[in-house]
Amino acid sequence: MTVSQQQVDTQAARLLKGVPDGDGLTEIQVALIQFALRATSSSLDTLGSRRWAERAVAAGATFDQLHEIVTLQSSVGVHAFFESSRALASAVCPEGGWPPLDEQRQHLWDKHIGGTKYWTTMQEEIPGFLESLLRMSPEAFEGFITYCGLPFRAQLVPNITKELISMASDAATAHRYLPGMRMHLRNAVRMGAGRAAIDHALRLGAESPSFIGVE
């Protein structure tokens, strides 16, 4: 079944109950979100990316910030990794009756996941992925954790803006990965985003281009 815009809107509305309006998006946030929506594997809109990069720079963004967004957006394709890993785990262990983690895997889990809020939210929205990945390949698990952390190390773009970008990308017409949309919406609210900014970012996602590709 194809995920519809109505499903995006309904789920977002449920998560936004009781969230105050707050401030709207700034000019630079809009430009960065618009740039990000085109600099993604779901769109591959190179001309649009360039146009919005120029507008973001005019609004005050730096080239280093834009490249941080490019790095962030490179992870959009990882959602197929999420779902394929969960499907494979279900095929290998249909009842989910995994044995206890061995010493190596338990160490990696405690080191990287623990009670970190970001990963806890991911486990709630995408249950089973992190554990399945760790059990099937500790190397892939460590590589995934390292890769996901790349756009957050330098902190050139505020994390709340990165969460709004990720939320809009996951709700975009050409993508619509609702587990990710829910996770990033919850993270954005936790960081202080209000209904006005979130609604605007989701609207930008709904109006984003379909897949264009490169000749």
Image (cartoon, rainbow, N blue to C red):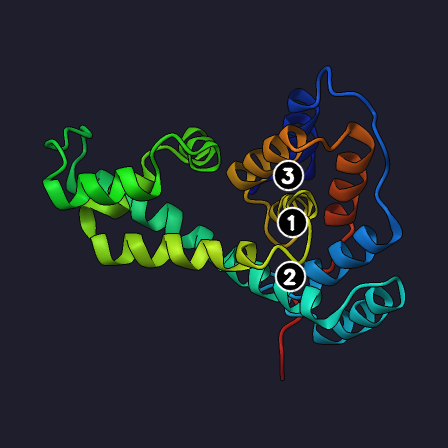
Q: Would you place residue 4 above or below residue 56 in this image?
A: above
- Specify whether residue 94 is in view: yes
Query: What type is the residue that disc 3 sits on?
Result: Ser
Most foreground residue, 95 or 60: 60
- Which residue occupies 50% across, 58% down? 75
Spatial separation of the CA atoms under disc 1 and disc 3: 24 Å
In x, y percent, where is residue 60? Answer: 85, 63
Q: Would you place residue 99 above or below residue 75 in this image?
A: above
170 relative to 96 in the view: left or right: right
Spatial separation of the CA atoms under disc 1 and disc 2: 8 Å
Q: Would you place residue 196 above or below residue 85 in this image?
A: above
Q: Of callouts 1 and 2, which one flags the residue occurring earlier in the amino acid sequence?
A: 2
User: For the C terminus, which image quadrant?
Assistant: bottom right
Give the residue at mark 2. 69
In x, y percent, where is residue 142? Answer: 30, 54
Q: Which mark is residue 162?
A: 1
Query: What type is the residue that disc 2 sits on?
Result: Ile
Label 3: how many residues lie within 10 Å, few (<14), some (14-19) or many (20+)?
Answer: few
